[in-house]
Amino acid sequence: MTSSNVLVTGGAGYIGSHMILALRDAGRPVVVLDDLSTGLAAAVPAGVPLVRGCVGDADLVTSIARTYRVGAIVHFAGSIVVPDSVADPMAYYLNNTVRSRELISAAVAVGVRNFVFSSTAAVYGEASAEPLGEDTPLAPVSPYGASKLMTERMLADAGLAYGLRYAALRYFNVAGADPLGRAGQSGGRATHLIKLAAQAAVGLRAGLDCFGDDYPTRDGTCVRDYIHVSDLVQAHMLALGHLEGGGPNLVANCGYGFGASVREVIGAMKRASGVDFPVRPAPRRAGDPAALVADATRLRETLGWVARHDDLDGIVASALAWERRLAETRRPAFTAAMGHA
Ligand SMILES: NC(=O)c1ccc[n+]([C@@H]2O[C@H](COP(=O)([O-])OP(=O)(O)OC[C@H]3O[C@@H](n4cnc5c(N)ncnc54)[C@H](O)[C@@H]3O)[C@@H](O)[C@H]2O)c1
Ligand SMILES: O=c1ccn([C@@H]2O[C@H](COP(=O)(O)OP(=O)(O)O[C@H]3O[C@H](CO)[C@H](O)[C@H](O)[C@H]3O)[C@@H](O)[C@H]2O)c(=O)[nH]1
Protein backbone atom coordinates (compact mmCIF):
# COMPACT_ATOMS: atom_id res chain seq x y z
CA MET A 1 0.00 0.00 0.00
CA THR A 2 1.22 3.47 -0.92
CA SER A 3 1.55 6.01 1.89
CA SER A 4 1.47 9.17 -0.20
CA ASN A 5 -1.34 11.58 0.58
CA VAL A 6 -4.55 11.69 -1.37
CA LEU A 7 -5.77 15.22 -2.12
CA VAL A 8 -9.56 15.29 -2.03
CA THR A 9 -10.94 18.42 -3.69
CA GLY A 10 -14.48 19.27 -2.62
CA GLY A 11 -13.96 17.13 0.50
CA ALA A 12 -16.26 19.37 2.55
CA GLY A 13 -19.16 18.46 0.25
CA TYR A 14 -21.59 15.56 0.22
CA ILE A 15 -19.73 12.89 -1.74
CA GLY A 16 -16.22 14.13 -0.89
CA SER A 17 -16.87 13.85 2.85
CA HIS A 18 -17.84 10.19 2.40
CA MET A 19 -14.67 9.61 0.36
CA ILE A 20 -12.55 10.99 3.18
CA LEU A 21 -14.12 8.48 5.57
CA ALA A 22 -13.41 5.60 3.17
CA LEU A 23 -9.79 6.68 2.72
CA ARG A 24 -9.33 7.02 6.47
CA ASP A 25 -10.98 3.65 7.07
CA ALA A 26 -8.41 2.22 4.64
CA GLY A 27 -5.56 3.94 6.53
CA ARG A 28 -4.75 6.41 3.74
CA PRO A 29 -3.55 9.91 4.67
CA VAL A 30 -5.79 12.64 3.25
CA VAL A 31 -5.67 16.38 2.70
CA VAL A 32 -8.71 18.40 1.60
CA LEU A 33 -8.93 21.47 -0.66
CA ASP A 34 -12.33 23.16 -0.60
CA ASP A 35 -13.48 26.75 -1.01
CA LEU A 36 -16.55 26.07 1.18
CA SER A 37 -18.84 27.57 -1.46
CA THR A 38 -21.38 24.80 -0.85
CA GLY A 39 -19.43 22.52 1.51
CA LEU A 40 -19.16 22.76 5.27
CA ALA A 41 -15.91 22.69 7.25
CA ALA A 42 -17.73 20.55 9.83
CA ALA A 43 -18.13 17.81 7.20
CA VAL A 44 -14.36 17.24 7.24
CA PRO A 45 -13.48 14.85 10.07
CA ALA A 46 -11.29 16.15 12.88
CA GLY A 47 -7.62 15.56 12.20
CA VAL A 48 -7.92 15.82 8.42
CA PRO A 49 -6.15 18.95 7.12
CA LEU A 50 -8.58 21.28 5.34
CA VAL A 51 -7.10 23.96 3.10
CA ARG A 52 -9.67 26.60 2.25
CA GLY A 53 -9.09 27.69 -1.32
CA CYS A 54 -9.92 27.20 -4.97
CA VAL A 55 -8.86 24.30 -7.20
CA GLY A 56 -8.13 26.91 -9.88
CA ASP A 57 -5.32 28.37 -7.76
CA ALA A 58 -2.37 26.51 -9.29
CA ASP A 59 0.15 27.92 -6.79
CA LEU A 60 -1.95 26.71 -3.91
CA VAL A 61 -2.40 23.25 -5.45
CA THR A 62 1.36 23.03 -6.08
CA SER A 63 2.13 24.03 -2.53
CA ILE A 64 -0.32 21.46 -1.09
CA ALA A 65 1.08 18.73 -3.34
CA ARG A 66 4.63 19.46 -2.15
CA THR A 67 3.81 19.97 1.52
CA TYR A 68 1.73 16.82 1.82
CA ARG A 69 3.56 14.65 -0.72
CA VAL A 70 0.38 14.14 -2.70
CA GLY A 71 0.41 11.08 -4.95
CA ALA A 72 -3.18 11.17 -6.14
CA ILE A 73 -6.02 13.63 -6.54
CA VAL A 74 -9.70 12.77 -6.25
CA HIS A 75 -11.48 15.75 -7.76
CA PHE A 76 -15.04 16.30 -6.50
CA ALA A 77 -15.00 20.12 -6.35
CA GLY A 78 -17.46 21.70 -8.72
CA SER A 79 -20.85 23.28 -9.26
CA ILE A 80 -23.63 20.73 -9.55
CA VAL A 81 -27.09 22.21 -10.16
CA VAL A 82 -28.20 21.54 -13.74
CA PRO A 83 -30.81 24.37 -14.04
CA ASP A 84 -28.31 26.87 -12.60
CA SER A 85 -25.90 25.89 -15.35
CA VAL A 86 -28.55 26.70 -17.94
CA ALA A 87 -29.18 30.10 -16.32
CA ASP A 88 -25.50 30.98 -15.91
CA PRO A 89 -23.38 28.77 -18.19
CA MET A 90 -20.22 30.88 -17.94
CA ALA A 91 -20.12 30.35 -14.19
CA TYR A 92 -20.26 26.58 -14.78
CA TYR A 93 -17.60 26.58 -17.49
CA LEU A 94 -15.41 28.64 -15.14
CA ASN A 95 -15.83 26.55 -12.02
CA ASN A 96 -16.04 23.11 -13.62
CA THR A 97 -13.92 23.39 -16.75
CA VAL A 98 -11.46 26.28 -16.42
CA ARG A 99 -10.61 25.54 -12.80
CA SER A 100 -10.26 21.83 -13.52
CA ARG A 101 -7.82 22.77 -16.26
CA GLU A 102 -5.72 24.68 -13.71
CA LEU A 103 -5.87 21.76 -11.29
CA ILE A 104 -4.86 19.22 -13.95
CA SER A 105 -2.00 21.43 -15.16
CA ALA A 106 -0.71 21.90 -11.63
CA ALA A 107 -0.99 18.15 -10.99
CA VAL A 108 1.03 17.38 -14.11
CA ALA A 109 3.63 20.07 -13.38
CA VAL A 110 4.21 18.96 -9.80
CA GLY A 111 4.29 15.26 -10.71
CA VAL A 112 1.02 13.95 -9.25
CA ARG A 113 0.51 10.74 -11.22
CA ASN A 114 -3.03 9.59 -10.48
CA PHE A 115 -6.31 11.46 -10.87
CA VAL A 116 -9.90 10.37 -10.23
CA PHE A 117 -12.60 12.68 -11.55
CA SER A 118 -16.32 13.14 -10.74
CA SER A 119 -18.10 13.02 -14.05
CA THR A 120 -21.80 12.56 -14.60
CA ALA A 121 -24.50 10.78 -16.56
CA ALA A 122 -25.39 14.27 -17.80
CA VAL A 123 -22.65 13.80 -20.46
CA TYR A 124 -25.09 11.53 -22.33
CA GLY A 125 -27.87 14.10 -22.67
CA GLU A 126 -31.28 12.94 -23.93
CA ALA A 127 -30.17 9.35 -24.20
CA SER A 128 -32.56 6.92 -25.81
CA ALA A 129 -30.86 3.61 -25.04
CA GLU A 130 -31.45 1.99 -21.69
CA PRO A 131 -29.38 0.98 -19.85
CA LEU A 132 -26.66 3.37 -21.02
CA GLY A 133 -23.21 2.00 -21.77
CA GLU A 134 -20.11 4.19 -21.86
CA ASP A 135 -20.09 4.03 -25.65
CA THR A 136 -23.45 5.79 -25.92
CA PRO A 137 -22.95 8.98 -27.96
CA LEU A 138 -21.98 11.91 -25.77
CA ALA A 139 -24.41 14.76 -26.32
CA PRO A 140 -24.92 16.78 -23.14
CA VAL A 141 -27.98 19.01 -23.18
CA SER A 142 -26.93 21.23 -20.27
CA PRO A 143 -23.86 23.41 -19.73
CA TYR A 144 -23.31 21.34 -16.58
CA GLY A 145 -22.95 18.14 -18.63
CA ALA A 146 -20.83 19.92 -21.25
CA SER A 147 -18.55 21.41 -18.58
CA LYS A 148 -17.88 17.92 -17.22
CA LEU A 149 -17.40 16.36 -20.64
CA MET A 150 -14.75 18.97 -21.46
CA THR A 151 -12.88 18.00 -18.31
CA GLU A 152 -13.03 14.34 -19.34
CA ARG A 153 -11.54 15.39 -22.67
CA MET A 154 -8.74 17.35 -20.98
CA LEU A 155 -7.90 14.30 -18.88
CA ALA A 156 -7.76 12.08 -21.96
CA ASP A 157 -5.42 14.53 -23.70
CA ALA A 158 -3.28 15.02 -20.59
CA GLY A 159 -3.05 11.24 -20.31
CA LEU A 160 -1.75 10.94 -23.86
CA ALA A 161 0.58 13.92 -23.74
CA TYR A 162 1.96 13.84 -20.20
CA GLY A 163 1.24 10.33 -18.96
CA LEU A 164 -1.30 11.46 -16.36
CA ARG A 165 -3.21 8.39 -15.20
CA TYR A 166 -6.91 9.01 -14.69
CA ALA A 167 -10.31 7.52 -14.05
CA ALA A 168 -13.44 9.49 -14.97
CA LEU A 169 -16.43 8.09 -13.11
CA ARG A 170 -19.82 8.99 -14.53
CA TYR A 171 -22.21 9.03 -11.60
CA PHE A 172 -25.90 8.51 -12.07
CA ASN A 173 -28.06 9.77 -9.14
CA VAL A 174 -26.13 9.69 -5.90
CA ALA A 175 -28.17 9.38 -2.71
CA GLY A 176 -28.18 8.09 0.85
CA ALA A 177 -25.78 8.56 3.72
CA ASP A 178 -22.98 6.76 5.55
CA PRO A 179 -24.54 3.67 7.19
CA LEU A 180 -22.62 4.44 10.40
CA GLY A 181 -24.18 7.93 10.52
CA ARG A 182 -20.85 9.75 10.24
CA ALA A 183 -21.74 11.76 7.12
CA GLY A 184 -24.63 12.68 4.86
CA GLN A 185 -25.91 15.38 2.55
CA SER A 186 -25.80 18.60 4.57
CA GLY A 187 -25.08 21.50 2.21
CA GLY A 188 -27.31 24.57 2.10
CA ARG A 189 -29.62 24.49 -0.89
CA ALA A 190 -31.19 21.11 -1.57
CA THR A 191 -32.29 20.23 -5.12
CA HIS A 192 -32.13 16.43 -5.25
CA LEU A 193 -35.32 14.37 -5.00
CA ILE A 194 -34.34 12.04 -2.14
CA LYS A 195 -32.90 14.87 -0.04
CA LEU A 196 -36.04 16.98 -0.59
CA ALA A 197 -38.30 14.04 0.23
CA ALA A 198 -36.35 13.47 3.46
CA GLN A 199 -36.76 17.14 4.34
CA ALA A 200 -40.51 16.87 3.72
CA ALA A 201 -40.63 13.77 5.92
CA VAL A 202 -38.98 15.56 8.86
CA GLY A 203 -41.24 18.60 8.43
CA LEU A 204 -38.61 20.97 7.06
CA ARG A 205 -40.73 21.63 3.99
CA ALA A 206 -44.47 21.55 3.48
CA GLY A 207 -44.37 18.91 0.74
CA LEU A 208 -42.88 17.98 -2.56
CA ASP A 209 -43.51 18.82 -6.21
CA CYS A 210 -43.62 15.91 -8.63
CA PHE A 211 -42.20 17.28 -11.88
CA GLY A 212 -44.23 15.65 -14.64
CA ASP A 213 -46.46 12.57 -14.66
CA ASP A 214 -46.83 12.06 -18.41
CA TYR A 215 -43.43 10.60 -19.27
CA PRO A 216 -43.26 7.35 -21.24
CA THR A 217 -42.32 5.34 -18.12
CA ARG A 218 -44.10 2.69 -16.05
CA ASP A 219 -46.00 5.23 -13.90
CA GLY A 220 -45.51 8.41 -15.96
CA THR A 221 -42.81 9.89 -13.68
CA CYS A 222 -39.07 10.06 -14.43
CA VAL A 223 -36.91 7.03 -13.73
CA ARG A 224 -33.39 7.39 -12.31
CA ASP A 225 -30.67 4.96 -11.23
CA TYR A 226 -30.08 5.92 -7.58
CA ILE A 227 -26.69 4.76 -6.32
CA HIS A 228 -25.90 4.73 -2.60
CA VAL A 229 -23.05 7.09 -1.80
CA SER A 230 -21.13 4.30 -0.01
CA ASP A 231 -21.18 2.12 -3.15
CA LEU A 232 -20.10 5.12 -5.21
CA VAL A 233 -17.21 5.85 -2.88
CA GLN A 234 -16.16 2.21 -3.01
CA ALA A 235 -15.91 2.59 -6.80
CA HIS A 236 -13.51 5.50 -6.21
CA MET A 237 -11.39 3.46 -3.82
CA LEU A 238 -11.14 0.69 -6.41
CA ALA A 239 -10.40 3.16 -9.21
CA LEU A 240 -7.61 4.68 -7.14
CA GLY A 241 -6.11 1.26 -6.42
CA HIS A 242 -6.43 0.36 -10.10
CA LEU A 243 -4.46 3.46 -11.20
CA GLU A 244 -1.88 3.12 -8.44
CA GLY A 245 -1.44 -0.53 -9.39
CA GLY A 246 -0.64 0.43 -12.99
CA GLY A 247 -4.07 -0.23 -14.52
CA PRO A 248 -5.03 1.61 -17.70
CA ASN A 249 -7.00 4.84 -17.76
CA LEU A 250 -10.68 4.29 -17.29
CA VAL A 251 -14.06 5.88 -17.98
CA ALA A 252 -16.86 4.07 -16.16
CA ASN A 253 -20.51 4.50 -15.31
CA CYS A 254 -21.54 4.31 -11.67
CA GLY A 255 -25.05 3.02 -11.11
CA TYR A 256 -26.92 -0.22 -10.47
CA GLY A 257 -28.50 -0.96 -13.83
CA PHE A 258 -32.06 -0.45 -12.66
CA GLY A 259 -34.07 2.62 -11.82
CA ALA A 260 -36.79 3.94 -9.56
CA SER A 261 -39.51 6.37 -10.57
CA VAL A 262 -40.23 9.62 -8.75
CA ARG A 263 -43.45 8.04 -7.42
CA GLU A 264 -41.54 4.99 -6.17
CA VAL A 265 -39.02 7.18 -4.36
CA ILE A 266 -41.79 9.17 -2.71
CA GLY A 267 -43.57 5.95 -1.70
CA ALA A 268 -40.35 4.59 -0.18
CA MET A 269 -39.82 7.80 1.82
CA LYS A 270 -43.39 7.76 3.11
CA ARG A 271 -43.00 4.11 4.19
CA ALA A 272 -39.64 4.72 5.84
CA SER A 273 -40.83 7.79 7.74
CA GLY A 274 -44.46 6.95 8.35
CA VAL A 275 -45.25 10.52 7.26
CA ASP A 276 -47.79 11.10 4.48
CA PHE A 277 -46.39 14.46 3.33
CA PRO A 278 -48.28 16.26 0.54
CA VAL A 279 -47.13 15.73 -3.06
CA ARG A 280 -48.21 18.32 -5.63
CA PRO A 281 -48.35 17.49 -9.33
CA ALA A 282 -46.15 20.03 -11.14
CA PRO A 283 -45.15 20.63 -14.76
CA ARG A 284 -42.15 18.85 -16.23
CA ARG A 285 -38.79 20.35 -15.21
CA ALA A 286 -36.81 21.64 -18.20
CA GLY A 287 -34.10 19.28 -19.38
CA ASP A 288 -35.25 16.16 -17.51
CA PRO A 289 -34.82 12.99 -19.62
CA ALA A 290 -37.58 10.40 -19.01
CA ALA A 291 -35.20 7.68 -17.85
CA LEU A 292 -31.48 7.43 -17.05
CA VAL A 293 -30.22 3.99 -16.09
CA ALA A 294 -26.58 2.89 -16.08
CA ASP A 295 -25.00 -0.12 -17.66
CA ALA A 296 -22.31 -0.64 -15.00
CA THR A 297 -20.75 -3.76 -16.52
CA ARG A 298 -17.40 -2.02 -17.01
CA LEU A 299 -17.23 -0.91 -13.38
CA ARG A 300 -17.89 -4.46 -12.20
CA GLU A 301 -15.62 -6.20 -14.69
CA THR A 302 -12.66 -3.80 -14.66
CA LEU A 303 -12.57 -2.95 -10.97
CA GLY A 304 -14.36 -5.92 -9.40
CA TRP A 305 -16.90 -3.50 -7.94
CA VAL A 306 -19.80 -5.12 -6.11
CA ALA A 307 -22.95 -3.21 -5.15
CA ARG A 308 -23.71 -3.61 -1.45
CA HIS A 309 -26.48 -1.07 -0.88
CA ASP A 310 -28.57 -1.48 -4.04
CA ASP A 311 -31.93 -1.31 -2.35
CA LEU A 312 -34.13 1.77 -2.63
CA ASP A 313 -35.68 1.34 0.83
CA GLY A 314 -32.21 1.20 2.39
CA ILE A 315 -31.00 4.24 0.45
CA VAL A 316 -34.04 6.24 1.46
CA ALA A 317 -33.83 5.08 5.10
CA SER A 318 -30.19 6.20 5.37
CA ALA A 319 -31.03 9.61 3.86
CA LEU A 320 -33.91 9.96 6.31
CA ALA A 321 -31.74 8.98 9.29
CA TRP A 322 -29.23 11.67 8.34
CA GLU A 323 -31.98 14.28 7.88
CA ARG A 324 -33.38 13.45 11.31
CA ARG A 325 -29.92 13.85 12.81
CA LEU A 326 -29.54 17.25 11.11
CA ALA A 327 -32.97 18.30 12.39
CA GLU A 328 -31.93 17.33 15.93
CA THR A 329 -28.73 19.36 15.76
CA ARG A 330 -30.53 22.34 14.19
CA ARG A 331 -33.29 22.44 16.80
CA PRO A 332 -31.24 23.89 19.72
CA ALA A 333 -29.68 26.55 17.45
CA PHE A 334 -33.11 27.44 16.11
CA THR A 335 -34.59 27.62 19.61
CA ALA A 336 -31.72 29.87 20.73
CA ALA A 337 -32.09 32.11 17.67
CA MET A 338 -35.80 32.52 18.48
CA GLY A 339 -34.89 33.67 21.98
CA HIS A 340 -36.32 30.56 23.68
CA ALA A 341 -33.01 29.13 24.90
N1 LIG B 1 -24.70 14.51 -6.27
C1 LIG B 1 -24.89 13.88 -7.42
O1 LIG B 1 -25.93 13.22 -7.64
C2 LIG B 1 -23.84 13.94 -8.49
C3 LIG B 1 -24.08 13.28 -9.71
C4 LIG B 1 -23.09 13.32 -10.69
C5 LIG B 1 -21.88 13.98 -10.47
N2 LIG B 1 -21.67 14.63 -9.30
C6 LIG B 1 -20.40 15.33 -9.11
O2 LIG B 1 -19.82 14.95 -7.88
C7 LIG B 1 -19.06 16.03 -7.34
C8 LIG B 1 -19.45 16.23 -5.88
O3 LIG B 1 -20.84 16.51 -5.80
P1 LIG B 1 -21.59 16.71 -4.40
O4 LIG B 1 -22.98 16.19 -4.59
O5 LIG B 1 -20.76 16.18 -3.29
O6 LIG B 1 -21.67 18.30 -4.34
P2 LIG B 1 -21.33 19.31 -3.14
O7 LIG B 1 -21.80 20.66 -3.59
O8 LIG B 1 -21.85 18.78 -1.85
O9 LIG B 1 -19.74 19.27 -3.10
C9 LIG B 1 -18.92 20.05 -3.93
C10 LIG B 1 -17.80 20.62 -3.06
O10 LIG B 1 -16.88 21.33 -3.88
C11 LIG B 1 -16.56 22.58 -3.26
N3 LIG B 1 -16.15 23.48 -4.36
C12 LIG B 1 -16.92 23.92 -5.38
N4 LIG B 1 -16.17 24.65 -6.23
C13 LIG B 1 -14.90 24.67 -5.73
C14 LIG B 1 -13.67 25.24 -6.16
N5 LIG B 1 -13.59 25.95 -7.27
N6 LIG B 1 -12.56 25.04 -5.41
C15 LIG B 1 -12.63 24.31 -4.27
N7 LIG B 1 -13.76 23.75 -3.81
C16 LIG B 1 -14.88 23.92 -4.54
C17 LIG B 1 -17.82 22.98 -2.52
O11 LIG B 1 -17.60 23.88 -1.47
C18 LIG B 1 -18.30 21.62 -2.01
O12 LIG B 1 -17.73 21.30 -0.76
C19 LIG B 1 -19.35 17.24 -8.23
O13 LIG B 1 -18.25 17.44 -9.09
C20 LIG B 1 -20.59 16.83 -9.02
O14 LIG B 1 -20.63 17.44 -10.28
C21 LIG B 1 -22.62 14.62 -8.30
O1 LIG C 1 -38.64 18.28 -6.02
C1 LIG C 1 -38.36 17.48 -6.91
C2 LIG C 1 -37.01 17.20 -7.29
C3 LIG C 1 -36.79 16.29 -8.31
N1 LIG C 1 -37.83 15.69 -8.95
C4 LIG C 1 -37.58 14.73 -10.03
O2 LIG C 1 -36.78 13.70 -9.51
C5 LIG C 1 -35.90 13.20 -10.52
C6 LIG C 1 -34.48 13.24 -10.03
O3 LIG C 1 -34.10 14.61 -9.90
P1 LIG C 1 -32.78 15.08 -9.13
O4 LIG C 1 -32.80 16.57 -9.14
O5 LIG C 1 -32.70 14.38 -7.81
O6 LIG C 1 -31.59 14.51 -10.01
P2 LIG C 1 -31.28 14.71 -11.57
O7 LIG C 1 -31.65 13.41 -12.22
O8 LIG C 1 -31.88 15.94 -12.11
O9 LIG C 1 -29.71 15.00 -11.62
C7 LIG C 1 -28.72 14.30 -10.94
O10 LIG C 1 -28.14 13.32 -11.75
C8 LIG C 1 -27.62 13.78 -12.96
C9 LIG C 1 -27.10 12.58 -13.71
O11 LIG C 1 -28.12 11.66 -13.86
C10 LIG C 1 -26.53 14.83 -12.73
O12 LIG C 1 -25.32 14.22 -12.41
C11 LIG C 1 -26.90 15.84 -11.68
O13 LIG C 1 -25.72 16.46 -11.15
C12 LIG C 1 -27.61 15.28 -10.52
O14 LIG C 1 -28.17 16.36 -9.81
C13 LIG C 1 -36.12 14.09 -11.75
O15 LIG C 1 -37.02 13.45 -12.60
C14 LIG C 1 -36.80 15.33 -11.18
O16 LIG C 1 -37.67 15.98 -12.08
C15 LIG C 1 -39.15 15.96 -8.59
O17 LIG C 1 -40.09 15.43 -9.17
N2 LIG C 1 -39.36 16.84 -7.57
Image (tube, rainbow, N blue to C red):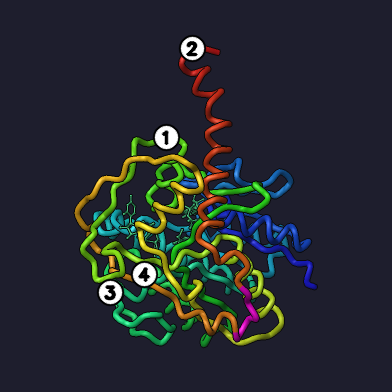
Question: Which of disc 1 and disc 2 is earlier in sequence?
Answer: 1
User: Which of the two residues, 47 or 190, is positioned nearer the viewer here?
Assistant: 190
Marking on residue 122: 4
Can you give x and y, in whole percent of width and height, for residue 167 in the image? 55, 77
Classify mark 2 as within 8 Å of ligand 1 or not, answering yes or no. no
Nearer the observer, disc 1 or disc 4? 1
Is disc 1 placed on a helix, strand or loop? loop
What's the residue at 68%, 85% (across, down)?
Answer: 246
The earlier-in-sequence mark between 4 and 2 is: 4
Amino acid on which disc 2 is placed: Gly
> For the residue with label 4, is its CB less than 8 Å from the closest atom of ligand 2?
yes
Q: Secondary structure at mark 2?
A: loop
Alpha-carbon neighbours of circle 3 within 10 Å: few (<14), some, or many (≥20)? some
Q: Position of residue 294 (x, y in %)?
A: 44, 76
> What range of the chain is rendered magenta?
301-306
Q: Residues within 10 Å of mark 4 (few under 14, many from 20)?
A: many
Which residue is at the front of the view, 16 or 315?
A: 315
Element at label 4: helix
The N terminus appears in which quarter of the rendering? bottom right
Residue at the spot of label 1: 204
Quickly name the residue at label 3: 126
Q: Is mark 1 within 8 Å of ligand 2?
A: no
Mark 4 → mark 2, Cα distance in angstroms: 45 Å
The residue lying at 39 percent from left, 66 percent from top is 224
Circle number at residue 339: 2
What's the CA distance linking mark 2 and mark 1? Answer: 20 Å
Give the CA separation, mark 1 to mark 4: 29 Å
- Disc number at residue 215? none
